[in-house]
Amino acid sequence: MNTQSKVAVPTLYEWAGGMEKFESWTDLFYQRVQEDSVLEPVFHGMSPDHARHVAHFIAEVFRGPANYSREEGSHYEMIHHHLGKHLTEVQRQRWIGLILDTADVVGLPDDPEFRSALVGYLEWGSRLAVINSKVDVISEPMDAPMPIWGWGETGGPYIP
Ligand code: HEM
């Protein structure tokens, strides 16, 4: 019997393991970026807060606490960071490959439902980052809301 409907469905943030998990993920990812020949030039000289801000951004999108939008930026500002960077598809694919590999290294959940949602979000967000990097002005309003991501159509969380 499928008992899923009788239990509260966790958010992606909760299922991932909370803020420490997001922070350890992006910390290690941006350390590895600095050793990657394709990505190092893209992120050369990035702010020491970069990894933490990206962790807080994704955690908030996954329905975690609003650290990013309360203290560190907004959806509009996040887009602004990508403007005029002229990111390429080769760089995006390396970014996706490395961040997913790092998800395995730090032990983010690897069940099919979570990974489907994670990959869906990273594909969506990274493609928008590339699109935004080709323009110099943002078409979104300054008060554009943060995106919200959920389990999607897979019906998660995965129950073995
Ligand atoms: C889901 C996908 C993505 C998210 C959520 C995201 C999020 C962010 C955030 C929050 C910042 C601001 C960091 C800060 O405040 O210091 C930022 C900056 C930046 N991102 Fe992304 N990003 C994504 C994809 C990408 C991709 C695919 C690339 C390149 C391949 C990229 C390149 C950059 C660069 C170059 C900056 C500016 C770094 C600097 O301050 O020098 N981003 N991103």
Image (tube, grey):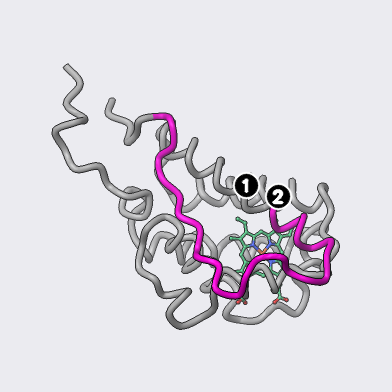
Q: Determine whether label 2 and label 1 are within 8 Å by CB.
A: yes
Residue at the image point whose x is 48% and y is 40% from the top: 117
Look at the numbered disc 1 and say if its residue's Cβ is closer than 8 Å to ligand 1.
Answer: yes
Q: In which quarter of the image is the N terminus?
A: top left
- Magenta stretch bounds: 128-154
Q: Callout 2, which amino acid?
A: Arg
Q: Distance between the residues labelled 2 and 1?
A: 5 Å
- Mark 1 crowd level (few <14, some 14–19, many ≥20, 10 Å Cα): few
**In this picture, is 11 found above or below 6?**
below
Q: Where is residue 107 in the image (x, y as percent from the top left)?
A: 43, 48
Per the picture, the main secondary structure of the magenta-coloured stretch is loop
Q: Is residue 122 left or right of residue 13?
A: right
Residue at the image point whose x is 57% and y is 68% from the top: 75
Q: Callout 1, which amino acid?
A: Trp
Q: In this view, does 14 lie to the left or right of 141?
A: left
**Residue under label 2:** 127
**Residue under label 1:** 124
Picture quadrant where residue 34 is located: bottom right
Q: Position of residue 78 (x, y in %)?
A: 62, 70
Q: Residue 43 carries which label?
A: none
